[in-house]
Structure formats: C-alpha cells, structure tokens
Image (tube, rainbow, N blue to C red):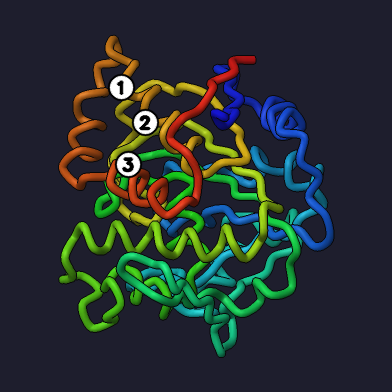
Amino acid sequence: MKSKVYFSREITPEKTVELFDLCQKRLKGNVAVKLHSGEVGNQNFIRPNFWKPIIEHVGGTVTECNTAYEGERNTTEKHLKTLEKHGWSKYFKVDLLDAEGPDLVLDIPDGEIIKRNYAGKNLANYQSLLVLSHFKGHPMGGYGGALKQLAIGIASSYGKAYIHGAGNTEKIWTSDHDEFLKSMADAALSIVRYFKGNAVYINVMKNMSVDCDCCAVAENPCMKDIGILASLDPVAIDKACLDLVYAAKDDAGQKHFLERVESRNGILTVNAAKKLGVGSTEYELIEI
C-alpha cells in the first residue's frame, strides 16, 4: 500500500494543524517536537510563531541537540542562549536533549554503515515524536527534510560527528560521502524503531535556499514557496518534496536548487532509508 502524504499549497500555521489532523495519529504521552532552532545569523529558518499552533495542538516540548561544529549552538550554554534569542524559550517548554551526558545509545544491528546511534539522552523521556522540518537545500546532504531531522537532528553532538564520520568521529568532514549519507539512513532507522510508529512528520517548503538553517551565512531562497506536507512516513514525505521540486519547471531557481541536491547525491539517503525499511518511496499525494 502506498504511503499517504497530505499536501497543501497554502502555507499557514492553521493549515499545518489541519494536515496533521488528516494523518489521524494521536501522539500519546510526552511528545518531543523536533525542529531546527536556527543558527544565529541565519535568515531562513522557520520562526516560533509559525510553529506555535501545531506545538500547542499536540502539547509538545521543543527539543534540540547541540551541534558538532563551531557556532552559537555547539555547547549547551550557547545553545540555550540561542533558543532564548530566537524566541523558542519564550513560547514553549524547551529540552536540549544532550545538555548533559551520557548519550542514549541505540543499536542498529542491520545498519549498512553504522551499527549504533548516539542520541541526546533526554529522548528517553518521550513516548511520541513530531518532526517539524523546513525543507531546503544542504551543503553536505544535498537537501534537508524529515530524514535529516531524524538522523543528524536527534543525534547528540558526539552522535552528529559519528554519523558524519560514517562511524569514525575523527573523519567528521573527511569520510566517504556516500557512506555519510547511508549513515544518516541508518541513524534515522534507529529513531523510527525507538518510537514504534508513534511519530508524525511535517515538511514546510518555504524559504527554500540551497543552504541549511545551520548556516550562519546562508544564500537567500532561490525557489518560490511550494507548500506544506504531512505524513506518517519520513521517506515518502521527503521523496514527495523532491518530486515537487522536480515538477517546478517554471521556477527560475529550480536548476540552482537541484544542482545542490544532485551534486551531493541527496537522493541516496532516501533510497538507503527505503532499503532499510524506514519507509516507502511509493506514495499517494493527497492535495488539500
């Protein structure tokens, strides 16, 4: 059976809630809301006021993890200041999952590249997961969406280096590129298994720069806004977003965006995740 992906060209906080409800998934217990807090200086990340209705709708806690590179989010002290500066702490309960060690180690016996994932230990306090992703390009992954949030986003600072290094933190920026992409799929698998289906994924296709929200200096968006998608399948929702980019032939920025995706072999993460059983690339796009 094809995975259902709900899609609206109307990009509003209210439409986000509507699409979530169409997924018909009740998130029980403590709900971790994984989103991108935005690097200081970045102009493209999605602000708290946009996400506020959906976070309140599920009664969730905003969760993040420290980065593995220099910036304003690579230590607990700096990241907490950034969460406050960007307004997250003002509106929501906030939990920096790897504020203190030790990490939560998740085994991946059938991982293709890595056999364990290092997540922020506070993840153990949650029974459900809502992944709110800003779909955009990425300097290393080609694109960023639900799968990257599951993998790099929920990994601790050490875990991020471990995934980037394809199992060797000393090779964080020098590992084989395709092995890094496959490691992201492995890590995503561990998080999907951890929550046992108690997860919903929302991708917002706006402010679509070729750069990630992790870039303090990022290119301005090159494509027109496309819409919001929601699904219970992280593979299907990312594949649907990529397909919508390929379908935007009249968009003057499409070529530039796709150059970023294709030059980094971004589709490999989707296909590797499909192979592992994280989700399906076969989907039904239901436009609302």
Dot 3: element: strand
Q: What's the distance in space between the residues labelled 2 and 1, CA to CA?
A: 6 Å
Residue 205 place in picture, x, y as percent: 47, 31
Identify the residue at image location x=18%, y=34%: 259
Q: Quadrant of the C terminus?
A: top right
Q: Quadrant of residue 1?
A: top right
Q: Is there a contact, CB below 8 Å, between mark 3 and mark 2?
A: no
Q: Count residues near mark 3 (Cα–Cα under 10 Å), then give few for <14, some for 14-19, many for 20+.
A: many
Write down the residue under mark 2: 242
Q: Quadrant of residue 181?
A: bottom left
User: Which badge, 3 or 1, comes first in the chain's sequence?
Assistant: 3
Write down the residue under mark 1: 246
Quick one: 126 or 225, which is closer to the camera? 126
Dot 1: element: helix
Q: What's the distance in space between the residues labelled 3 and 2, CA to CA?
A: 10 Å
Write down the residue under mark 3: 137
Q: Count residues near mark 1 (Cα–Cα under 10 Å), then give few for <14, some for 14-19, many for 20+.
A: some
Q: How many marks?
A: 3
Position of 189 relative to 114 (above/below)? above
Dot 2: element: helix
Q: Is there a contact, CB below 8 Å, between mark 2 and mark 1?
A: yes
Q: Quadrant of residue 29?
A: bottom right
Tell me which amino acid carries mark 2.
Leu
Tell me which amino acid carries mark 3.
Gly
Identify the residue at image location x=67%, y=41%: 49
Nearest to viewer (mark 3 / mark 1): 1
Tell me which amino acid carries mark 1.
Tyr
Q: What's the distance in space between the residues labelled 3 and 1, CA to CA?
A: 13 Å
Q: Residue furthest bottom?
A: 102
Q: Count residues near mark 2 (Cα–Cα under 10 Å), then give few for <14, some for 14-19, many for 20+.
A: many
Identify the residue at image location x=71%, y=33%: 23
Identify the residue at image location x=77%, y=34%: 24
